[in-house]
Image (spheres, helix red, strand yellow):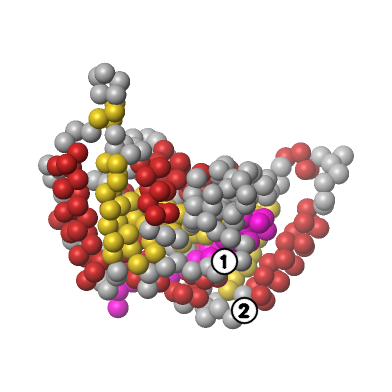
Amino acid sequence: MPRPIVTRILLATDFSDSAERAQEYGQYLAASFGVPLDIVHIVEVPPEAEDAGDERKPLAAVETDVRDRLTALREHLHGLPGAIHVGQAKGQPSGQIRRIVQETGADLLVMGLQGQGRRPYGLIGTTAERVTAEGPCPVLTVPLPQTEAAPCTLRESSKVEVQRVLAPIDESDPSLDALEYAMQFACGLDAGLVLLHVLEESQDHRGGISLDDEAGQRVHWDNRLAEFASVGTALGLAVDQEVRTGLPSDSILAGALHHGCDLIVMGTHGRGARVRVPFGSVARAILRQATCPALTVKSPKFVTGLRRQLPPVFRTFEPP
């Protein structure tokens, strides 16, 4: 039997509003894939907390409170088909989360985009950004539900369900790894798939905006996306495709809204990213303005034991 795309999920929670919404996605995905769910809370211990005059809540009391909340959460989720494990750790959150991912063997990390700091919409929590950039495994970040000031399509009462997955594609290997993941993830959820490529505008020497051979590029990418779509169709997926022109992050977000997608699956680096840059600018921009949850895939963290569906020949791009 081929290895499924998700075999164990880790939910990192700080009990914030964003984490509570992420919990709903962790619960939904654990039930959909029928896999174990690990839930962890990291207790931060600042150096100043050890000062004798510190008036903060004693560490022992904090740990007891966390243990009680995690126990209540496990009891709330007891109906899931897979095992549920809860635990807490002390230290720097992103480092501890990476350690726990490795120890548990989790192949999907779920967490809220904003943390206890209650950052306004459009700002990524420090822990979420670090964990996504460092990529211990694919990371699903969930934004806060819609408010008057936020364009997020999630609503407090909306049912958690992934029905359409958007996969932005360029000619980079991380993009194709993310496409492979998106296809198999969508299969596991019986969801539809939307393939999107953005033809980027560029500045010409006169300062205006131009596209080199836009018509030829569009035909090339229509054909290219059709090739990818044929693989998805063979897997039983309902696949749509679109080629847009504009800034990558804006076009990807607009495409997600246009096609009614409720999940974006993307690589952490695109064709313009440099190796030494830990987190691509397009991926960061999408996370900051996400209108739905985003799942970032850092190559090659998800491929161990996984049978790929995209033929190797698809990794050889021949632009027109």
Within the image, what quadrant is residue 24 found in? bottom right
Pick out the residue farthest to the top: 206
**In this rendering, does residue 93 appear at all?**
no
Front-lying residue, 111 or 95 = 111
Front-lying residue, 287 or 109 = 287
Within the image, what quadrant is residue 314 found in? bottom left
SS for tag 2? loop
Query: How many numbered marks, from 0 up?
Result: 2
| Structural distance between the alpha carbons of marks 2 and 1 | 22 Å
Q: Magenta span has 248?
A: no
Q: Which residue is mark 2?
A: 78
Left or right of 150 on screen, residue 60: right
SS for tag 1? loop
Q: Give the residue type that dot 1 points to.
A: Ser
Q: Which mark is residue 44?
A: none
Q: Give the residue type that dot 2 points to.
A: His
Q: Is residue 203 above or below residue 268?
A: above
Q: Which residue is mark 1?
A: 158
Task: Give the mark nearest the N terminus, 2 or 1.
Answer: 2
Residue 312: x and y in percent read: 17, 57
Q: Which one is closest to the eye, mark 2 or mark 1?
A: 1
Task: Indicate the quadrant containing the N terminus: top left, top right, bottom left or bottom right.
Answer: bottom left
Say which residue appears at 84% left-offset and 41% top-offset.
54
Residue 285: x and y in percent read: 45, 41
Give the magenta part as a residue range.
1-26
Within the image, what quadrant is residue 282 found in? top left
Q: For label 1, count other residues whose C-alpha is less than 10 Å away and answer few (under 14), some (14-19) or many (20+).
A: few
Say which residue appears at 68% left-offset and 45% top-offset.
117
**In this rendering, does residue 220 appear at all?**
yes
Q: For label 2, count other residues whose C-alpha is less than 10 Å away and answer few (under 14), some (14-19) or many (20+).
A: few
Say which residue appears at 62% left-offset and 58% top-offset.
19
Residue 304: x and y in percent read: 33, 62
